[in-house]
Amino acid sequence: MPKVGDGVDAVTAFAGAAVAGMALFVPFTSRTSITVDTPYQVASMANSVPRATTLGLIVAVVVAVLIRPANRPGLVWLIAAGGAAILGINYFVGHAMTSAEVLTTQNYVNALVGGVIFGVLCLCSLQLRWAGLGFALGSVTVFVYGEVIALVTSNMLSTTDRAVHSPSALIIVAVVLLALNTVRYRRSIRSPIVPPLVADVPIVPIVSVTVLALSVLLATERLQRAVDGQRGNAWHIALAVGLTIVAAFVAALLLPGRDGTGVLLAVSLAAAADSLIDAEQMGWYLVLVLVAGTMGILTGRRWATPWAVLFGAAALGAFATIAERLPWSFAWTAGTVALAGVAGYAFGSIRISYWPSAVLGLGALYLPSILWAIPTRLRNWETGPHPMAEATAGRAALAITIGAAASLLLLYRIRPGTPAPTVKP
């Protein structure tokens, strides 16, 4: 039976993961008086989000690699509390701003600090059962929220006060809870003897995340330029898909053992999520997301197999190809709930031998895929003047998933046998 302290850990990790995820994944705005409607402002926002997320994920892995040898829970909660406080300051300072151009800078600040919080909390949650559950659920909720809520409609921010910033109340709650846990764990700071590591192991996750994040960003921006110039076609998309798959496989191969499995799963699931249609707000469907996410996490903890995640991602991609033929409300609801379940299962089923590998595997879900550069009518993140066919996004996601499955088979062939002793989040 869980104790009161376990519940505090779970709620704190949930709030911290939610704040970190929104800082990494969702564009920052602070007030309705800031209007983002000129082509320059929209382009700046569209460009800053994937770049900031890329930078934030690299920071998250670097922090995890550096903090892992210390293995001090009290220090981890303290760093997370300080990061959340900085996010709060950045948020409230934004209320005094009236220039939309400032939002780009604030996005980068948010992503950097969010990466620090995500890295330390993910690392700490791997060692605490209930904190791990809370962290996973918070991350899944933000991931689904960012994927299925429209950020841009008709070249304007559509939900400035509701969908594209971390709510002030959530930030305050996160700061208080993280500070409380810092006090709770102040006497549990310990310095255990850490076994010597191979010289290249600590740097490997950093190299891996750099290869993955920068390659995906490069593929996305090149495809976006082709689409903006009305030169985008199937060959451009195929090239971007191929670069994504190769980058994911190289990043997976760089990690020790079979830890790279999580990277391949994250890349395929992120692409599938990006192919789904959007709505303007979540509303009470948030309850369904929480329920489906929780069920997925618990199922993944009990029965873990990467092929189930790939199957789910493929099903989502296939569903996206026919979604336009279905009633909008049904297509959006079914896609949202299914995504929450599959993402929850992916978080719950991750198995790693080196903790920072989990930060990369889970954080890679937040990386914007090349589908951000494929404009369609029902996916409100338009980067080009002429939307493509709705099925294009689903087909691209399906191709990435098939490539990830083939890469996983090759990874298992290169790294045969039973993986090293695993750590469950």
Image (tube, rainbow, N blue to C red):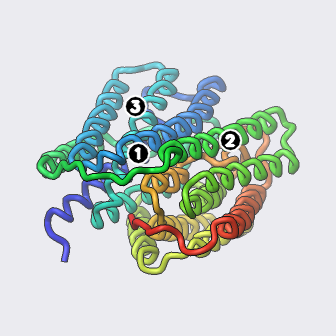
Mark-to-mark CA distance, 2 and 3: 34 Å
Crowd band around label 3 with a 10 angstrom C-alpha radius: few (<14), some (14–19), many (20+)? some
The residue beneath circle 3 is 31
Which residue is painted at 29% across and 50% down in the image? 71
The type of residue carrying mark 3 is Arg
* In this view, 371 is above or below 397: above
Q: Is residue 48 toward the left or the right of residue 248 in the image?
A: left
Q: How crowded is mark 2: few (under 14 residues within 10 Å), some or many (20 or more)?
A: many
**Residue 107, position as x, y percentages in the image:** 47, 31
User: Viewer-nearest of labels 2 and 1?
Assistant: 1
Where is mark 2, residue-wise? 215
- Identify which amino acid the numbered label 2 is placed on: Ser
Callout 3 secondary element: loop
Q: Is mark 1 on a helix, strand or loop?
A: helix
* Picture residue at 55% right of the left edge, 29% below the top: 36
Residue 214 is situated, as x and y percent measured from the top left of the image, at 64, 38
